[in-house]
């Protein structure tokens, strides 16, 4: 049994955290034992890891003052765990784990999972970590993994090492994400949505890169022509109490058709109730939510960011980012289709997802990479 220590910036609910949670049980079948160390935050997702029997250790780097003591604690944990490999996720963890790996002479793999590096959508500390990472990418990691071609190209452009890098795409479990008529009826009943009302779904935490504003402007326009339209939005911070999100809305007027549900765990049930899925982001790499929606046999309307165009293929609808008018037109077009036509598109989306984006395919790619790195590092 080989041992991997995964070092991740935080364990809030997000794409990297979700994918790692799905990946680790698959690694067990390939004789890899995993421990997860997270740097900051309260780790609200940590309980989900523990429920799967995954060892989770908080480093508690909640202040710049704690960095030195945090590094020492990380080194202590690595000495105790004695892993064959350190697999890091996101910029700050890449840097810290990369340094620790060099000190301990343990091979390190960086995971980089975003493609929009603009200073308009990234925090100052993230931009600082990106700038520092570029030159260090040539000396700290044994290999760099990206989850999209767009991310790999964007980082090559700013100086990240291109050799010893590869793209390993995400995947979802088709046994979990499968349409259910019973769940569709159940959720619609709970939300008070008629069986024949079209639902557009949106799944994303509240973040500038997810561009909830453009989505809300677009569905507002669609509602002017389709008064029967309902919209279901899921994600951390996507709630009526979020005044920045709802500043152009009125609860008394809009809550009958706009369902802001916040973070949810019953995603299969939520997708089952939808008729169309929309991703309105201005910054993505390889979005899990789009894969989940495809696997749930939903027609997908996405913005042309990251690898979204490649993911949905010819059967998806792709719109320029931050263009609410064209997004509204495309959503209206799909909403106005016959139900049988939407179902046909959705089934094609699921077939594509089954062919390319299953969790087992993604996990096998990671295992092959881990095997190569551990074997090559031992031979040096």
Image (tube, rainbow, N blue to C red):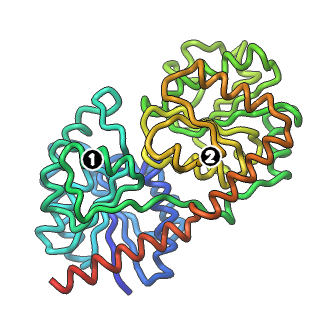
- Residue contact at pointers 2 and 1, CB within 8 angstroms: no
Tell whether 111 sits left or right of 257: left
Residue at 46% across, 38% down: 305
Q: Position of residue 92 (x, y in %)?
A: 25, 49
Tell me if mark 2 has few (under 14), some (14-19) or many (20+) residues whose alpha carbon lies within 10 angstroms of its own: few
Q: Is 253 placed left or right of 52 in the picture?
A: right
**Residue at x 71% of width, y 21% of height:** 255
Of residue 349 and residue 252, the one placed in the foreground of this image is: 349
Image quarter in which the N terminus is found: bottom left
Q: Residue at x 42, y 62 (%)?
A: 168
Q: What count of labels does the image hold?
A: 2
**How far across and how far down the image is residue 358, in percent?**
58, 64
Q: Position of residue 107 (x, y in %)?
A: 22, 72
Q: Please say whether residue 192 is visible from this viewpoint.
A: no
Dot in front, 2 or 1: 2
> In the rendered view of the protein, which quadrant contains the C terminus?
bottom left
Q: Which mark is residue 314?
A: 2
Local packing at callout 1 (Cα closer than 10 Å; few below 14, some 14-19, many 20+) is many
- Identify the mark at residue 155; answer none if there is no mark: 1
On the picture, is 141 further left or further right than 244?
A: left
Position above or below: 240 against 29: above
Which comes before the other along the chain, label 2 or label 1?
1
Depth check: 110 or 138 in front?
Answer: 138
Dividing the picture into quadrants, the one containing residue 177 is: bottom right
97 versus 90 height, above or below: below
Left or right relative to 119: residue 354: right
- Secondary element at tag 1: helix
Q: Position of residue 173 (x, y in %)?
A: 61, 63
């Amino acid at each position: 049994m080989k041992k991997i220590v995964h070092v991740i910036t935080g364990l809030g609910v997000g794409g990297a955290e979700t994918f790692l949670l799905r990946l680790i049980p698959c690694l067990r079948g390939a004789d890899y034992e995993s421990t997860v160390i997270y740097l900051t935050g309260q780790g609200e997702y940590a309980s989900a890891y523990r429920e799967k029997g995954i060892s989770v250790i908080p480093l508690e780097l909640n202040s710049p003052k704690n960095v030195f003591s945090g590094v020492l604690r990380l080194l202590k944990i690595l000495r105790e765990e004695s892993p064959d490999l350190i697999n890091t996720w996101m910029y700050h963890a890449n840097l810290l784990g990369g340094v620790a790996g060099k000190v301990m002479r343990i091979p390190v793999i960086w995971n980089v999972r975003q493609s929009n590096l603009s200073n308009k959508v990234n925090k100052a500390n993230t931009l600082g970590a990106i700038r520092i990472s570029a030159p260090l990418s040539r000396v700290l990691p044994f290999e760099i993994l990206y989850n999209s071609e767009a991310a790999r190209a964007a980082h090559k452009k700013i100086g990240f090492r291109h050799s010893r890098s590869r793209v390993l795409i995400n995947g979802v479990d088709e046994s979990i994400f499968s349409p259910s008529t019973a769940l569709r009826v159940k959720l619609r009943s709970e939300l008070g949505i008629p069986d024949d009302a079209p639902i557009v779904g949106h799944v994303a935490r509240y973040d500038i890169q997810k561009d909830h504003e453009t989505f809300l402007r677009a569905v507002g326009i669609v509602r002017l022509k389709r008064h029967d339209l309902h919209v279901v939005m899921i994600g951390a911070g996507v709630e009526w109490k979020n005044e920045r999100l709802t500043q152009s809305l009125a609860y008394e007027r809009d809550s009958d058709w706009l369902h802001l549900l916040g973070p949810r765990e019953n995603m299969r049930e939520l997708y089952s109730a939808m008729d169309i899925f929309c991703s309105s982001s201005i910054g993505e790499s390889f979005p899990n939510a789009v894969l989940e929606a495809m696997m749930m046999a939903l027609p997908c309307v996405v913005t042309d960011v990251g690898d979204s165009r490649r993911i949905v293929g010819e059967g998806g609808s792709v719109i320029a980012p931050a263009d609410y008018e064209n997004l509204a037109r495309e959503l209206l077009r799909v909403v106005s289709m016959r139900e049988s036509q939407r179902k046909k598109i959705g089934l094609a989306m699921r077939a594509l997802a089954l062919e390319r984006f299953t969790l087992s395919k993604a996990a096998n790619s990671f295992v092959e990479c881990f095997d190569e790195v551990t074997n090559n590092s031992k031979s040096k």
